[in-house]
Amino acid sequence: MNETATLWWDTQTQSICYIDQTRLPADYTIVQCHSIARLARAIERLEIRGAPALGVAGAFGIALSAQNCKKKHLHTFLSDVHRDAEILYATRPTAINLGWGIERVLEKIEHVQDITSARRIALTEAMTIAREDTISCHAIGNHGASLLPDSCTVLTHCNAGSLACSSWGTALGIIRSAVHGGKSVKVIACETRPLLQGSRLTAWELIRDGIDVTVITDSAAAHLMRTSSIDAVIVGADRVTRDAVFNKIGTYMHAVCAHHHNIPFYVAAPVSTFDAKKTESDVIIEERTREEVTTIGNRIFVPSLAGVKNYAFDASPINLVTAIVTDHGILRQPIDIDSILSLKSTK
């Protein structure tokens, strides 16, 4: 199984290195990021994407800000780092992990006595978060693998693999762990319009690992569920509130269809993705640019006078979820919010 890192800190160049996901599958490109402005652009453009990966990116972003800041007085130094944090916060409003990673590093340096200590502590905490994310993904994989039959076909949506984390993955982590444990798993990957994260990223990862994968159009999923071609659906999550799971747009359709056809619908997410303080109505659904829908390559596929709605995420009611697979165990129906709070408090 491939354990290639998605993003990491390069000590020689004092920069964030990452795989540019917009170039896959045609080009495997490593980018060195030396500034907060470049990191913010990378996140906005989805060069870095996926909830856990965004948490790691946010943490490394604060470390990068601390290394780059030239202010001599601690108060103005911390003010500049907080200003950079706000720039990063604004890039993706729906996914919770980005803010979680930022805040965790900020809290560590809030009461330091000097700038040298702040730089060292920020980088140490960011690297700890990256290591913990890999451990977390393996734990999710080990817990979730027990839910799959010895031989099965799993449908997944978007990309919740190693590219969406520091490595291994959440939804794909379950599949990887199941295959690693000797189970025969075939994967149906929805293409995931409009940016094709399923066909470009999920298929690329699974082929690299030698796992059987077939790409389908998003609209074919219900047909395959109805014809008994799918044994389970596994997706990731960008935020889990008291009453809903937020994930890539189209996830709700899969949840409804799986529920109708009595197919298990599993969500794979670390406890850091839980937002127990909010409900669905409190969360902003990110809307992205018109061009992502209207244009493929150099061709325009939508008339210029036609309106376009490009939602990045949707919300699936928690009662449609068979179980949430976390790094601390499996939450089954009825999913108890107190259990989620208890899990998060031990993180």
Image: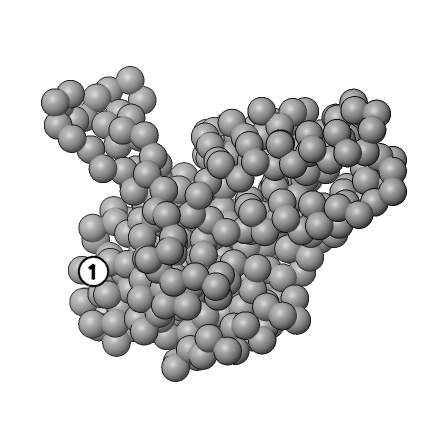
Q: Which residue is mark 1?
A: 222
Nearest the camera: 346 or 15? 346
Residue 178 visible? The answer is no
Residue lying furthest front: 75
**Image spot of residue 60 (x, y percent):** 67, 39
- Residue at 18% x, 60% y: name it: 223
Give the x, y percent position of residue 228. Answer: 23, 70
Residue sitting at x 34%, y 35%: 288
Element at badge 1? helix
Q: Is residue 295 above or below residue 213?
A: above
The amino acid marked with disc number 1 is Ala
Q: Residues within 10 Å of mark 1 (few under 14, many from 20)?
A: some
Q: Quadrant of residue 311?
A: top left
Query: In the drawing, does residue 102 fall left or right of residue 208?
Result: right
Which colouring convention does the figure follow? one colour
Establish if 106 lies above or below 14. Answer: below
Residue 43: tell me if it is visible.
Answer: yes
Horizontally, residue 53 falls left or right of residue 152, namely: right
Image spot of residue 34 (x, y percent): 68, 24
Number of numbered labels in the structure image: 1
Quadrant the C terminus occupies: bottom right
Determine the residue positioned at 12% across, 22% down. 305
For image coordinates 26% across by 68% down, the residue present is: 258
Residue 42 rendering spot, x and y as whole percentages:
53, 30
